[in-house]
Image (cartoon, rainbow, N blue to C red):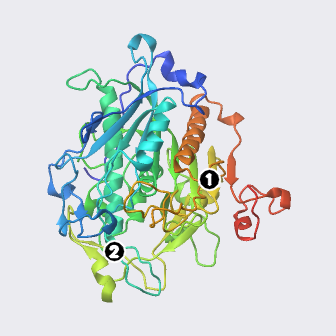
Amino acid sequence: MGGGVKAQPYNNPPTSPSDSTPANCNWDLRSQIFNTVYALDGTHMTSVIVYGNGTNTNYHDVAFQYEDKKDQCINSDGCSGISDDYADTLKIFVYYPKHDYSTATGSKLPVFIFAHAGGFSDCKRLTPVGESQELCTDMAHRGFVVFSIEYRTGRKIDENPGTYAPYTSVFQLAAAYRASQDVRGAIRYIVYRQNHEGTGDINDPYRIDLNNIFLGGASAGSVAMLSASYFYETSGQAMLNDVFPVQGDVITHVMGDINIDFYLGNDNINYMPGVKGILNCWGSLNVPLSYFPKGGIPHPIDFFKNLPYKPPVISFCGRQDNVFNYNYQPVYYSPAMGAHSFFNSTSNCLINPPYTLEGLDNSTPDMYNLGSGGFFNLVLQPLGIFLEFYMDCQMHHGLDDDDNTCGKCISQPTNYFLRSDCVTPCAYTSNFGVPSANSQLLTYIYIASRAATFFQAIMSLTTSNVTKTSFIECENYRNSCGTDSYNTTNCLSGCSGN
């Protein structure tokens, strides 16, 4: 499919009263109100959907030997299979409330589609552990049909020292683009399944309201989800071509259209009319260099202001994030010189190779990265978009990164809160003010409760009655450390109250 093909609106079935006024608008979504359906059968999940059709080797991801030593992922360089459990496919795990889905009760529920974290690295597959399960299960408890999607991974980081290191490698950009293709394909297929429910072999035990689609992701998954919404153009993909520049070419030609037909269902579905909100957990978006003039005032709002869809966003991030700066930061591509040259160009698993980074001189940034705070402050807030923003001032990148020895206990690899000696607890402080000394789970429950309440305000059309909120966990206004709603300098000036 070429970049100029216009996506067609989905053919939504006739609405019932419950579609326009969802039943869960009458429920308090801050609390867990449902039991959920989510089961394991041996080593496989029973609630699983395959959505990728892997008919072309260009659809594969790239695997690098020992890219992720922690997971002991052993692959040879080159194209890999897609899924650990289903050869050459991608899959979606489903969590849904135990609920009366009969058509007589008009019982469609809103849908929450989540993309897991992992930095696009090898072996970071979707598994029923960690934040994917915790967050998705809790959202299902609150009345959402939840889809947790797998996407292609595989990247190699340029770890060579340099004046402007760390450099961003071509493999990182290619992985982010593949993930963005997959996320869009998954969303389209979820919409397709609901539109064709009860026909052919599609008989899902749940029903979803396509007028109330909510997206979410953590870290790399959030990058892909934000791309699926805030880089969505109804004709072409000029924005994506700008943020994935290719030397002498365009990303569409090298890696295919962002809506390429690698997936089951109708690849022309325009899902954005139904997307009503986004949960962003420590994600980011790249913005072209021209919107951050040297010595001038940044104006990234101009890159987004003409989008046809700009859904509300609720964001969570850490002040100490060293992966995506909470505000914004310059991005330098791996140059075609010395030890960096391997990371400047690739021909692996592409539609039309090579993918060569388009770069300026080494002293000039090639792109800017907007973190959650920068996106809030420089784009969403000026556009008047309904939003909430939460920042923890001790948090790094993710909830278990405050203590770099966290989760290193070999005998208990799933215990996030033991140091490598398997005795000493980690110093967990990524809690956004939640009164829990050592509980990642309770923090995820808090994130889910805030997101569900935020989404409920959107569904019930009461956003005008809800304050646009920013919660900076380290600010203490009683000590006169700040007067505005986004004075993050307080985090550096010694204010400590919650």
Q: Amino acid at mark 1?
A: Ala
Q: Amino acid at mark 2?
A: Leu
In this rendering, is residue 391 above or below 338?
above
Query: Residue 421: where, in percent of width, then height?
Result: 45, 67
Q: How many marks?
A: 2
Disc 2, SS: loop
Which residue in the protein does label 2 denote?
Answer: 357
Which residue in the protein does label 1 denote?
Answer: 437
Of the numbered discs 1 and 2, the one sitting upstream in the chain is 2
Report the quarter where the C terminus lies.
Answer: bottom right
Residue 428 left/right relative to 37: right
Disc 1, SS: loop
Query: Residue 49: where, in percent of width, then height?
Result: 27, 37
Near-viewer residue (45 or 234): 45
Local crowd at mark 2 within 10 Å, few (<14), some, or many (≥20)?
many
Q: Could you say which quadrant of the image residue 312 lies in?
A: top right
Near-viewer residue (276 or 223): 223
Name the residue furthest top: 104
Residue 192 appearing in the image: yes
Local crowd at mark 1 within 10 Å, few (<14), some, or many (≥20)?
few
For image coordinates 50% across by 59% down, the residue present is 284
Q: CA distance from mark 1 to mark 2?
A: 45 Å
Query: Residue 189: where, in percent of width, then height?
Result: 30, 37
Near-viewer residue (262 or 52): 52
Residue 143 left/right relative to 26: left
For image coordinates 42% across by 81% down, the residue present is 360
Q: For the residues carrying marks 1 and 2, which lies nearer the camera in this image? A: 1
Residue 383 appearing in the image: no
